[in-house]
């Protein structure tokens, strides 16, 4: 698995979590949790792009 693969996976996961959150309007707690997971995936993707793991700068 390459760096680009890991970034793509995190971006895809964030999109999936956001899409599911939009579908689950009757359960606010679940929506909140899914949006938190989406945010965490976006943060991980950004850290993979620019973080110290692959020699980027923080």
Image (cartoon, rainbow, N blue to C red):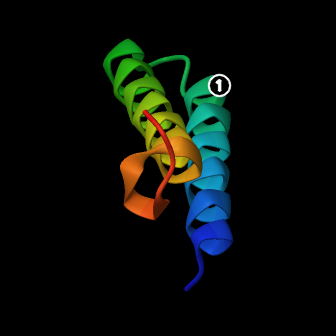
The secondary element bearing badge 1 is classed as: helix
Q: Quadrant of residue 4?
A: bottom right
Query: Residue shown at 68%/61% (left/top)?
Result: 8
Measured as percent of width and height from the top left, residue 15 is found at: 67, 42
Q: Nearer the viewer, residue 6 or 58?
A: 58
Q: Is residue 25 above or below residue 48?
A: above
Question: What residue lies at 44% left-to-right and 45% top-to-bottom?
Answer: 51
Give the crowd class for mark 1: few <14, some 14-19, many >=20 residues within 10 Å: few
- Tell me the quarter of the picture where residue 28 sits: top left
Which residue is the site of mark 1?
A: 22
Q: Is residue 17 left or right of residue 53?
A: right
The residue located at (65%, 25%) in the rendering is: 22
Name the quadrant of the N terminus: bottom right
Q: Residue at x 66, y 54 (%)?
A: 12
- Where 54 falls versus 38 (above or below)? below
Compared across the picture, whether 9 is left or right of 58 comes to: right
Query: Residue 29, percent across and down?
Result: 31, 18
Q: Residue 49, image x and y in percent?
A: 59, 49
Return the residue nearer the eye: 54 or 22.
Answer: 54
């Amino acid at each position: 698995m390459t760096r680009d693969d890991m970034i793509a996976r995190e971006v895809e996961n964030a999109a999936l979590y956001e899409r599911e959150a939009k579908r689950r309007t009757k359960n606010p707690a679940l929506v909140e949790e899914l949006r938190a997971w989406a945010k965490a995936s976006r943060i991980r993707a950004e850290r993979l792009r620019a973080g110290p793991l692959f020699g980027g700068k923080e």
